């Protein structure tokens, strides 16, 4: 084997940590496997998996890079288990985090505020202030910085965020204050808002710095332990961490700016789906269905949709992220009956612990996974090696109780509940999907659905029927698809500088900042690559964000490299983008430049090969048929494996494919065939399209 020609992608989940080993040259299909996650010390599971990979699949010196996706920072924010943060703000702005927080129910005056990441008692004011043009109005002397450091130390904070009013106008001013505070506090990290995101919007920028500080000590410990563990395994390959924007950064960058990694897991799945779109030529809706929720995203022309504003734990993120929409329905979603006697699925989830009733881990409420088992879609044998003999009788008893609560008096309450749950969960997902598509100006008929994750391949065709999508493309390693996306991630980051002035007077500034950011972006990319080489693959795309005066949000306008444009030409560029987005232009309205941006990318080396196979792949399926609920009644349904699709063969539904890390449901009216890196589900010619209704059946 060629030395240094393998990449390992890792995705840390709540139940399992997934690994994919890919051959950069594309000569061999990727190999995937799972190890149980260790919630008390996530690094332990990662290192156990890498020890297995280097012991059984490749040698340590054959590894070119390790690319790691994680939700550790995200979980810390959602569960409020991060650092004890102190916030330093300009004098007079102590309540910036409380007064401007957006509440989940905007018109409910009685709702409680979400728990803040920083207590008001831990917010310290400092005599530091700029105006909107970067002019210093107040600068702290050494005594003022000493006072701030003493107050922070007295409060026992373990991380600090700093946000000076109008700090974006001169990031160096705020950076100097941050360095002075950090010097006095020793090992307490200080996150500067202007260094992370130098752009207008005081609350959002302050919130971003606070988030970064909140997860910084946790990520520093975790990634530090991971680096030490790699050395212990004899792995000298560089470690990268995937980001919310669908790329990856070096481990040092991730330690400095962990806020960029919060949504890295879902983003990695979308990037893997983008590779599938490139391979198959299809526009895709990615459907990442896990235990708690389902993440959906749109991929057109092999390019995912991006957003410049999102939210985590009730706190805004204004950095670029892959546009992922979460639906509160997953394999662990709890099935219940509300006070009005209506059936509900989610948003509460049983999670990994206690989990579904059938798994025998203490769960006492019916979940969607229990329903899949009771309906015969999932095989108990698929879970036996992880959970032993399943408790289907307990799940069946709960399904019967729910049927009675819904007023069912027929002979088969289990079939009634299962049919109702399948129908409702599909309808809920379809409703959210169609709303997301409408926001982007699409219809489902323009897309194929790419389902992955633990439960995605079960729900994919049912959802496609509900929304009338073209077809379904199930990745061969659907259960570890996010890890595959991590392995093929490009090095990527967006740099920006705030402007906040009329375009008529800032055109020279736009050109100068674009040139500066281009040089900084190349330097940053080379630092990520280090000794790995490959510097010739660096590309930088620049642009500026602008808006008509009085508008709330800005549009991004691309700039060509080394192109000299005056104010009139830049204005015309903006008018064209605005017309394309909103259908009109307002030539009489002044234009404001908000920021200048530079997006740097270093493509992952090699040619992606999506024909991944789980390490314990077994084409021989033990049971060749299963009793499954179809059209409201029970019938024997064939169980297939990948071998049944060899040589261009196809399998008509109803059928199920039991793969080592997932189960693929082929409903009535659908036909399965193998394509590049996926199982393609297409509607059977001459069969009516209401296959989902036929599978779920009428409910008496």
Image (tube, grey):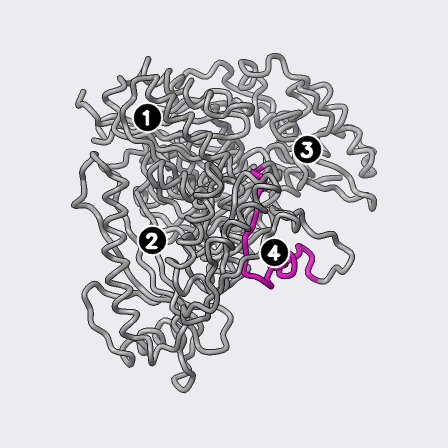
Q: Which residue is mark 1?
A: 21
Residue 418 shows which numbered tag?
3
Q: CA distance from mark 2 to mark 4?
A: 40 Å
Is residue 316 shown in magenta? no
Q: CA distance from mark 4 to mark 1?
A: 43 Å
- From the image, which quarter does the C terminus lie in? top right
Nearest to the eye among marks 3 and 2: give it: 2
Task: Tell me: residue 249, above or below residue 438.
Answer: above
Q: Which residue is mark 4?
A: 97
Mark 3 touching mark 2, by CB under 8 A?
no
Looking at the image, which residue sits at the far bottom?
588
- Magenta highlight range: 82-106
Residue 301 shows which numbered tag?
2
Residue under the point 62% across and 38% down: 79
Mark 2 touching mark 4, by CB under 8 A?
no
> Of residues 92 and 364, which is closer to you in this image?
92
Q: Is residue 555 left or right of residue 105?
A: left
Residue under the point 78% across and 57% down: 110
Q: Secondary structure at mark 3?
A: helix
Nearest to the eye among marks 2 and 1: give it: 1
Mark 3 touching mark 4, by CB under 8 A?
no
């Amino acid at each position: 084997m060629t030395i240094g020609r393998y990449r390992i992608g890792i995705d840390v989940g709540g139940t399992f940590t997934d690994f994919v080993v890919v051959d950069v040259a594309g000569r061999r299909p990727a190999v995937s496997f799972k190890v149980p996650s260790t919630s008390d010390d996530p690094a332990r599971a990662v290192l156990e998996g890498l020890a297995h990979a280097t012991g059984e699949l490749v040698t340590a010196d054959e590894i070119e890079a390790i690319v790691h996706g994680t939700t550790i920072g995200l979980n810390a924010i959602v569960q409020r288990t991060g650092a004890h943060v102190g916030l330093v703000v300009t004098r007079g702005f102590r309540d910036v985090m409380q007064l401007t927080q957006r509440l989940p129910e905007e018109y409910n005056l009685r709702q409680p505020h979400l728990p803040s990441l920083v207590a008001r008692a831990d917010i310290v004011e400092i005599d530091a202030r700029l105006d909107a043009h970067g002019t210093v109005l107040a600068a702290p002397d050494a005594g003022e910085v000493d006072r701030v450091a003493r107050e922070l130390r007295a409060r026992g904070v373990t991380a600090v965020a700093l946000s000076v009013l109008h700090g974006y106008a001169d990031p160096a001013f705020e950076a100097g204050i941050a360095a002075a505070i950090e010097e006095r506090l020793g090992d307490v990290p200080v996150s500067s808002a202007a260094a992370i995101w130098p752009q207008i919007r005081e609350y959002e920028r302050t919130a971003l710095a606070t988030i970064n500080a909140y997860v910084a000590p946790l990520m520093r410990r975790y990634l530090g332990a991971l680096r030490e563990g790699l050395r212990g395994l004899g792995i000298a390959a560089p470690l990268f961490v995937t980001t919310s924007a669908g790329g990856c950064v070096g481990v040092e960058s991730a330690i400095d700016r962990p806020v960029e990694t919060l949504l890295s897991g879902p983003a990695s799945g979308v990037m893997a789906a983008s590779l599938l779109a490139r391979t198959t030529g299809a526009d895709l809706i990615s459907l990442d269905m896990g235990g708690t929720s389902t993440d959906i995203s749109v991929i057109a022309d092999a390019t995912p949709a991006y957003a410049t504003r999102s939210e985590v734990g009730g706190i805004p993120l204004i950095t670029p992220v892959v546009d992922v929409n979460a639906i509160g329905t997953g394999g662990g979603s709890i099935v219940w009956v509300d006070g009005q006697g209506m059936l509900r699925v989610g948003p509460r989830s049983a999670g990994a612990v206690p989990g579904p009733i059938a798994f025998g881990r203490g769960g006492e409420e019916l979940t969607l996974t229990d329903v899949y088992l009771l309906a015969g879609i999932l095989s108990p044998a698929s879970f036996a090696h992880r959970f032993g003999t399943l408790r289907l009788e307990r799940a069946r008893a709960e399904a019967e109780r729910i049927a009675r609560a819904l007023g069912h008096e027929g002979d088969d309450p289990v079939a009634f509940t299962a049919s109702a749950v399948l129908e409702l969960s599909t309808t809920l997902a379809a409703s959210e999907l169609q709303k997301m598509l409408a926001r982007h100006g699409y219809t489902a008929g323009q897309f194929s659905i790419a389902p992955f994750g633990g439960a995605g391949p079960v729900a994919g065709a049912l959802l496609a029927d509900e929304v009338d999508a073209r077809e379904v493309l199930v990745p061969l390693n659907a259960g570890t698809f996010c890890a595959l996306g991590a392995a093929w991630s490009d090095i990527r980051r967006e740099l920006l500088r705030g402007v906040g002035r009329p375009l008529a007077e800032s055109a020279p500034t736009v050109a100068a900042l674009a040139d500066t950011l281009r040089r900084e972006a190349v330097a940053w990319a080379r630092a990520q690559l280090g000794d790995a080489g490959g510097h010739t693959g660096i590309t930088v795309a620049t642009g500026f964000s602008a808006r008509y005066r009085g508008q709330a949000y800005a549009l991004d306008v691309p700039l060509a490299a080394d192109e000299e444009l005056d104010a009139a030409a830049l204005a015309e560029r903006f008018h064209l983008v605005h017309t394309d987005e909103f259908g009109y232009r307002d030539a009489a309205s002044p234009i404001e430049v908000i920021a200048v941006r530079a997006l740097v990318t270093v493509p992952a080396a090699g040619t992606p090969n999506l024909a991944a196979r789980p390490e314990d792949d077994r084409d021989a399926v033990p049971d060749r048929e299963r009793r499954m609920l179809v059209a409201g009644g029970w019938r024997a349904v064939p169980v297939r494996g990948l071998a049944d699709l060899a040589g261009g063969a196809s399998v008509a539904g109803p059928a199920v494919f039991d793969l080592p890390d997932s189960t693929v449901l082929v409903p009535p009216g659908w036909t399965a065939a193998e394509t590049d890196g996926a199982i393609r589900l297409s509607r059977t010619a001459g069969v009516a399209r209401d296959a989902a209704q036929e599978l779920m059946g009428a409910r008496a």
